[in-house]
Structures are given as structure tokens and as C-alpha cells.
Image (cartoon, rainbow, N blue to C red):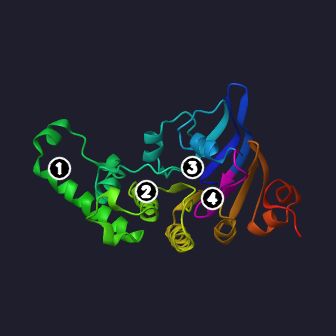
Amino acid sequence: MALLEVQDLSIHFGNVQAVQEVSFTVDEGIIYSVIGPNGAGKTTLFNLVTGIYQPTSGAIRLQGQPIQGRKPEELARLGMARTFQNLQVWMNMTAIENVMVGAHLRLERNIFKAIFRTPGLRRNDEKLKAEAADWMSYVGLGDYVGARADSMPYGALKRLEIARALAMRPRILFLDEPAAGLNPKETQDVDALVRKIAASGITTVLVEHDMKMVMNLSDRILVLDYGKRLAEGTGPEIRQDPKVIAAYLGRKS
């Protein structure tokens, strides 16, 4: 059974059909990429699967369980985490506090304990802080553990958002353009990080415009065009698909 199954997924915004009957499956432990021209519906598809948008029609199943209509916080408890195309970082917080937010589903929610800062809650906070520091080191941000988010360079902030998502301990991680705006060295660092995450057993679904990165990383690739599924396959299959070449990758010389 696939970890994620998407069947005939659609969403309409007025008369605009942003995603039209898209189907795909993602097996556990792979890197699965979604590509396509600007406006193809890639981020909209991410927003549907991760509960930001509610589909007009179609089905989404995680480990065989229907999840369409679930809110993002509910999906997080089921093992789904994501990053965003535009940075979602709290700049007025420290870097480590941002990562600790990712573990909020495991925080003690007892109001009495929260108000009076009981010893158990304080111990839990310290545990979460140590865990957040470990995740920062994992993504290569060990030098920023004591930094404020607003003092960090853009490339580091992209990895900080990934650390926060990992702190949720997901089974499946959605990365929306993790290399966008990065220089070649930073892109290489993200490429290596995605490989590291996948090697740890976390299924990774990627939207990315850097075709070199996509082709090098991906086990499977889904191509969207005007909100529709254009093709799906391995990197070599996608490179040679005439429909993809015509619509997106450019004609062969």
C-alpha cells in the first residue's frame, strides 16, 4: 500500500480550475517531485494535500485513511509536515524557538501546569529545547542555535523552516521550493539535506524549479500543466517524454 494516495483531486476558484482530476501515489521512503511551468498548480496541489485548501472533489488517503477535509494540525498529528514557498518564519523569535514551535503537538496542554509553570512543564520545555538544538545541527545550523531569526541569512532561514518541520517528526515531508532564491552552494547544501532526510526514512515530496536538483534527487516525478497531470515517471522517462519537452523542458537541440 502506498503511503499517500491522491485520486481525481480537483479545486475550482470561481471559474478557474486550478487543479483538475489529478491522481498519483507516493510510496514510503522515496523522494517524489512535482514540477511544471509557473501557474501549473503545483503549490495549489500541495495546499490541497496538506489541508490548507479543501478540494472541490477527489480523495486523499494517508496510510489508507481518508484525510481530505482534515485541518493542517490534524494532519500533523498523523505524520504530515511541510514548508512553504514563501518563508513562514517568526522573525521576532530566536531560531531555536522557531524550531520548538514544530514540536508544539507534543507540548503539555494542561492549563494549570502552563499557568503555574510546574516542574514537569519546565522539564518538558528543556527537553524540547535540546531536541530543537539537535534538529538545528541536523540541518547544518548548529552555529545559529543562539541567534535571533532576523539576524540569519536567507539560505539559513530556508533550512530553519525545514528543521521546524522535522521537529514535528513527520512520516511524510512536503518541501515547497526549498532551493528558491539560493545560490549554487546553498542549493547543493539543500540537495544534500533532502537526501539525508530521505535516507533517514522520511518520505519527501518536493516542488522545485531547479531541474538539475529534481532530476538528481527524485525517485519519481509528476509533471503538471494548467492544473492537469501531464506525465509521471522516473527522471530519464520525464526527460524523454515528448509532451514534457514541448510543454516545459524545451525542445531538444
Q: To which residue does mark 2 refer? A: 161
Give the SS element for disc 1. helix
Give the SS element for disc 3. loop
Q: Is residue 193 above or below residue 53?
A: below
Tag 3 and tag 1, C-beta contact below 8 Å: no
Inter-mark Cα distance, 2 to 3:
25 Å
Measured as percent of width and height from the top left, residue 230 is found at: 80, 50
Amino acid type, mark 2: Glu
Q: Residue at x 58, y 64 (%)?
A: 29
Q: To which residue does mark 3 refer? A: 63
Q: Quadrant of residue 183?
A: bottom right
Bounds of the magenta segment: 25-39
Count of residue discs: 4
Tag 2 and tag 3, C-beta contact below 8 Å: no
What is the quadrant of the C terminus in the image? bottom right
Instruction: Pick whichever of labels 2 and 3 is earlier in the sequence.
Output: 3
Give the SS element for disc 2. helix
Q: To which residue does mark 1 refer? A: 121
In this rendering, would 185 be left or right of 96?
right
